[in-house]
Image: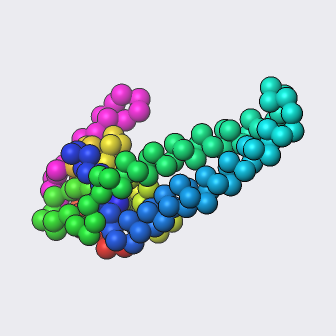
């Protein structure tokens, strides 16, 4: 899954189905479960000193935030459209870079939303400093991005291919 500057999210069909199933669970069975927890805690008496009630309400808030995130994500989703394999770095691509021109010091990562992060490959957000620095650059070009300390760092784009996973 990747995000573009137009706020469109590209998803594989598998990722879309997974997120849609999570949303359906959260708006169905999970809401019923949390409502039952809150109702049970209310029956215990004074709500000001009821730890179970406050924990359930906090859980409900987190759950509703996730529902809003998933709803927005799925509303802006495009399914099955991979980025072009034209050598230009774009969200949805696996990118290999070399730091400061040292082709022995490389990093390969998926340029995508954190929702798509997996153990198989490191994921960097298109909105991260490195992500914004490399987007639009072609293989062989140098790109610059800002480090957290305010200094600039330079990388060379070695490879940019659409993510196949």
Would residue 79 be visible to someone looking at this image? yes
The residue that appears at 66% across and 38% down in the rendered structure is 58
Residue depicted at x 75% and y 48%: 37
Part of the protein shown in magenta = 136-154
Image coordinates of residue 107 in percent, x first then y, are 37, 58
Residue 141 as seen in the image, left or right of residue 97: left
Magenta stretch encompasses residue 141: yes
Instruction: State the residue at coordinates (16%, 58%).
Output: 88
Whole-percent x and y of residue 50? 83, 33
Q: Relative to 38, is 20 on the left or the right? A: left
| 119 up-or-down from 141: above or below | below
Q: Residue furthest left?
A: 86
Compared with 93, 165 (above or below) is: below
Colouring scheme, one of rainbow, by chain, secondary structure, one colour: rainbow
**In the image, residue 151 above or below residue 14:** above
Pick the front one: 77 or 125 = 77
x then y, percent, for residue 126: 31, 48
The residue located at (41%, 33%) in the rendering is 148
The residue lying toward the viewer, choosing from 29 and 65, is 29
């Amino acid at each position: 899954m990747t995000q573009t500057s137009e706020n469109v999210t590209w998803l594989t069909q598998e990722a879309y189905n997974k997120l849609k199933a999570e949303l359906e669970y959260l708006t169905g069975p999970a809401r019923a479960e949390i409502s039952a927890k809150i109702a049970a805690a209310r029956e215990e008496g004074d709500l000001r000193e009821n730890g179970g009630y406050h924990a359930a309400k906090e859980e409900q808030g987190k759950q509703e935030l996730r529902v809003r995130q998933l709803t927005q994500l799925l509303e802006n989703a495009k399914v099955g459209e991979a980025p072009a394999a034209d050598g230009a770095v774009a969200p949805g691509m696996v990118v290999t870079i070399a730091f400061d021109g040292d082709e022995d010091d490389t990093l390969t990562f998926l340029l995508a939303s954190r929702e798509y992060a997996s153990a198989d490959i490191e994921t960097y957000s298109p909105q991260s400093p490195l992500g914004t620095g490399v987007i639009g650059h072609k293989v062989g070009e140098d790109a610059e991005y800002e480090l957290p300390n305010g200094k600039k760092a330079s990388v060379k784009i070695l490879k940019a291919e659409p993510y196949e996973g």
